[in-house]
Amino acid sequence: MSSQNSSSALLLRVAVLGVAVVFFQIGAVSEVPVFGVNVDLSPLLVAFVGLLCGSTIGAVNGFAVGLLVDLALLQTLGVTSLIFTLIGYWCGRLRELRDPQAALTPLLVGAGASAVSLVGYSLMEFMLGVDAPVSLELLRQIVVGVVVNTIAALPMWAIVRRSLEGALPEDPRRRRRRRAYTTGGLSPLSRS
Amino acid sequence: MYDKTVRRRRAVLILLVVLSLLLLTAYFGEAPGGRLHGVQRAFLSVVSPIQDGANKALKPVRDLFGSIGETLDAKSQRDQLRKQNARLRAELVADQAEKRSYRQLLALYHVDQLGVGEYRPVTATVVAKSPNIWYSTVTIDKGEAAGVHVNDPVVNSEGLVGKVAQVASDAAQVDLITDSTMGVSARIGTSRTTGIVQPKVGDPNDLLLQYLPANTQAQNGEYVVTSGTVSSGDESLYPPGIVIGQVSSMNEETGYTSVNVHPTANLHNLDIVQVLTAARGSRAANLAGALIALPPGQGSSAGSSPAEQLASTGAGG
């Protein structure tokens, strides 16, 4: 019963966070260009939710955020959902398989998610057909976009983690490792 | 238990991917009046008041960050504008006589009385903007209820902004001139040769005026304006003479000339725009060659806006 309550609270927080970030993105962040590109918070949100909550919630959140973006901006339905589903799932799997704890993890995950989002979008658009000539400047836009998003990754990580803190399920693997450290099992000191 | 978790995880992923692909295929294959497009428009109608509220609430945040960037650019812009101002002042003096006779000609054709007001402009506020480099679109807070239709041209004080792509009751989506789907029939300055202005995808500061005759000549800085004709059967009919941008360079292609054009409207920072709701129809076609004034408030009298002066002289700045 308590586990059910906790997962409902988590889903509610993820949903509220998703809606808030998408509206903040299209209402404010998109209108402030940085180095000629716009910071895109949505792939960062999807990646960090996946990294904190796991692959299933990550994928579902990615799909929902993508759908919301496509609906709100009247874009081709399904494109953003597809890309964000994969980003959310992969970031969730990263947590489940490796559980990275390094301080730079959010930066790297943010950069990776932004790159996948921008390149994936371009590939999808090419596959769907482009009538207009494509400039080489697109490559620069993608690279600068990834850099700018990477800069935004750390504050975004802090916001996502703070928003979901308290509702996140206790990870058995992490608990085992913490116990092992505190009881000396894996401590480098005890091994020496 | 572990197998069950793995199976469920994979099933969720496959389900979502398949759902995305189904949505994509259905949306891409249907007509603009189809069900999914209808769902999007209905959604926009529901969220546009929220977007409007969020836009107003977040304006201070936007302005704060915007002002930081603007301050950094201000110095170089000031120097550039001083030079431009000096050159334009000299040109203005030289053009006074020519302008007087031009006004008389316009009066003969009763065109000087037709400002932008003739196109029933609807003033709208930009409430949302796509962050995607592939979709140069903005959402405005006026829709069908205010008389906005699909394909209506959208301008601001600096020139052509784009055209209405989709309309909901109280909101509309505008494709900017840098959107990959856009094509605008245009000419350089006062010349009669026309071409099609298309965006260069990925470069929001560059447009391409294509399919000009091989011997076309243009000076850097010359203004490119709408020609008032259609580029294809179902696209909007832009009124003639709306400034699109300035020539930045010329390219000789095999069989035709293309010209790089720098858009005059600052599409990164759109706030107030005007939708010309009566631009379609025969009036604009009858006025081909004539120049319209830009939105009211930018010029004190008909035809005296800076954009019109520049467009009429074809001079660069």
Image: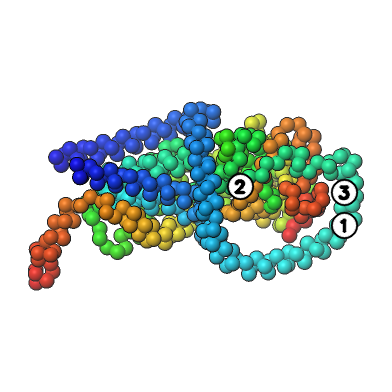
Amino acid on which the number 2 mark rests in the picture: Thr
Dots 1 and 2: beta carbons under 8 Å?
no
Quadrant of the snapshot with the C terminus of chain B: bottom right
Q: Nearest the camera: B200 or A192?
A: A192
Identify the image quadrant of residue B173. top right
Which chain letter matches label 1? Answer: B
**Numbered mark located on residue B102 in the image:** 3
Q: Who comes first in sequence, dot 3 or dot 2?
A: 3
Q: How far across and how far down the image is residue B133, in percent?
A: 51, 49
User: Are the residues flagged by discs 3 and 2 from a single subunit?
Assistant: yes
* Residue A24: x %, y % from top left: 46, 51
Question: In whole angstroms, how far apart are the C-alphas of marks 3 and 2?
Answer: 35 Å
Q: CA distance from mark 1 to mark 2?
A: 36 Å
- Answer above or below: position of A39 versus B164: below
- x, y percentage for residue B167? 58, 35
**Residue B63 placement, left or right of A114:** right
The N terminus of chain B lies in which quarter of the figure?
A: top left
Up-down relation of residue B26 to residue B265 (above or below): above
Which residue position is annotated with label 1? B96
The residue carrying mark 2 is B125
Under mark 1, the amino acid is: Gln
Q: Nearer the viewer, residue B212 or A86?
A: A86
